[in-house]
Amino acid sequence: MANKAKVPETSEAQYTKMTETPIPRLVLSLGIPTTISMLITNIYNMADAYYVSTLGTSAGGAISVVFGLMAILQAFGFMFGHGAGSNISRMLGSRQLDRASKYASTGFFAALGCGLIILVGGLTFINPFMRLLGSTETILPYARDYGKWILIAAPAMASSCVLNNILRYEGKATLAMIGLTTGGILNICLDPLFIFNKGNVVFGMALPFGFGLGTEGAGVATAISQYISFSILLSMFLLKKTQSKLSFRLVQKDIGTIGDIIVTGLPSLARQGLNSVSTMVLNNQAKPFGDAAIAAMGYVGRTSSLIFSVGLGIGQGFQPVSGFNYGAKKYSRVKKASYFTLFFGAGFIGLISLFGFIGADTVIGWFSTEKAVIDIGSTALRIQCAFLISLPVSVVATMLFQSIGKSGKAFVLSCLQSGLLFIPLCLILPRFIGITGIQLSQPLAYFFSATVSVPMLLIFLKKLPKDGI
């Protein structure tokens, strides 16, 4: 009880906000900044693809290949970020501020270390690594040029995921948005300057100067932007705008704390790790159909990720609400937040997917004028959009279970959503129906994942106890 008496006023105000603000307003106030951050992140990923695609189909394919590397970095970043953040949210909900700082510091430095390991290992074996990610021999030179700079940015990318998630789970999504959007906008602006030469016309204007680095330039722009974004996010902690603190002396070596972070974050590792494996499988399955198929499916993946970011962004606004209120034993608010996020996400994604379905040819045409790329990509995008409305169900279920510490259920659903269904579908269907099998694999995986998630979510919510018990 003495610990509760020492809670600072700022922490008390945050506790009141998280446990008393009406659910729709609270989820949206936390989810909209996160959605904006994810939209900007996906837009700059699409900007990389757009600019590089003007250099040729093989160059565009390189962006699709290296997307798997980004998924690996995000896998470790989100594992430590969601693992630490979920525990932090519940610690703050139960007013244990010191333990929150220990989780924050342990998660941050663990992600930074993983990023450094991937940096060294990736650069040492970059050629076989790019081939493993699905590169053909014609794509390899471009993938290597782009990928080496993504590897150089690896420590910043992995640890930024932790900083971002700690801010979100503390209920400070706007501060997280500032860091991520600044880096994303900077990346979009730097891309043409590093990729093209002086005088090249971009969006109707001749560049006043340019470095002409081609595909490598896109990597350089991304690396610079990632380190600037990392610096902004870190400054939020150094300027003491957070309740939890970062310090190397607070890093915990006991199996309990580390285990809590890893077990809680394991669904995120599974989700992002399987996304990376899925990208490798997709690229390798598309190889027999040529560089056009690899490039087209990469463009579809990035466009779908843009739509997906809306559902995921609102869901990530929901996570701190559910975790905080679960820790505070306000179970009725957990239930209300779950239903609100589910229906809002389904409606919003459904609307965006409708526009994606109607304008599929135009969207893929932004990236390439090659007929084979447009034909393959537009068909795949339409199928994706038809099934994306089922996505919020599995997103809400996974994020709920992860944020309240039900890691086993969250892990199973993450695996189903991110690759456990997609990988066998992608390996089997093309044998019987060719490229159509590749185009159908991800949408069917979304649908089957949702059918499993619905009963798990409804049964859990029905069994929640009364508040305070």
Image (cartoon, rainbow, N blue to C red):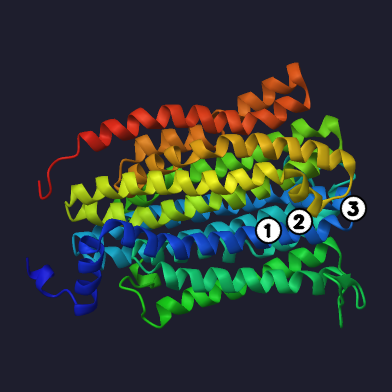
Looking at the image, do the residues carrying marks 3 and 2 touch, with CB atoms under 8 Å apart? Answer: no
The circle drawn on residue 238 is none
Looking at the image, do the residues carrying marks 2 and 1 touch, with CB atoms under 8 Å apart? Answer: yes
Which image quarter: residue 199? bottom right
The answer to which of 260 and 380 lies nearer the viewer is: 380
Helix, strand, or loop for circle 1?
A: helix
Q: Residue at x 80, y 50 (%)?
A: 62
Q: Compared to 467, does 32 lie above or below?
A: below
Number of numbered callouts drawn: 3
Q: Which residue is drawn at 74% across and 26% down?
A: 436
Q: Residue under circle 1?
A: 45
Three-letter code for the amino acid on which mark 2 is drawn:
Ala
Three-letter code for the amino acid on which mark 1 is drawn:
Asn
User: Which residue is most to the left?
Assistant: 1
**10 Å neighbourhood of mark 3: few (<14), some, or many (≥20)?**
few
CA distance separating discs 1 and 3: 17 Å
Q: Compared to 158, does 264 lie above or below?
A: above
Q: Tell me the quadrant of the picture where the N terminus can be found.
A: bottom left
**10 Å neighbourhood of mark 2: few (<14), some, or many (≥20)?**
many
The first of marks 3 and 2 along the sequence is 2
CA distance separating discs 2 and 1: 6 Å
Q: Residue under circle 2?
A: 49
Helix, strand, or loop for circle 2?
A: helix
Q: Compared to 277, does 2 lie above or below?
A: below
Left or right: where 294 falls relative to 317: right
Q: Residue under circle 3?
A: 56
Which image quarter: residue 461? top left
Helix, strand, or loop for circle 3?
A: loop
Work out whether residue 373 can be spotted.
yes
The answer to which of 25 and 48 lies nearer the viewer is: 25
The first of marks 1 and 3 along the sequence is 1
**10 Å neighbourhood of mark 1: few (<14), some, or many (≥20)?**
many
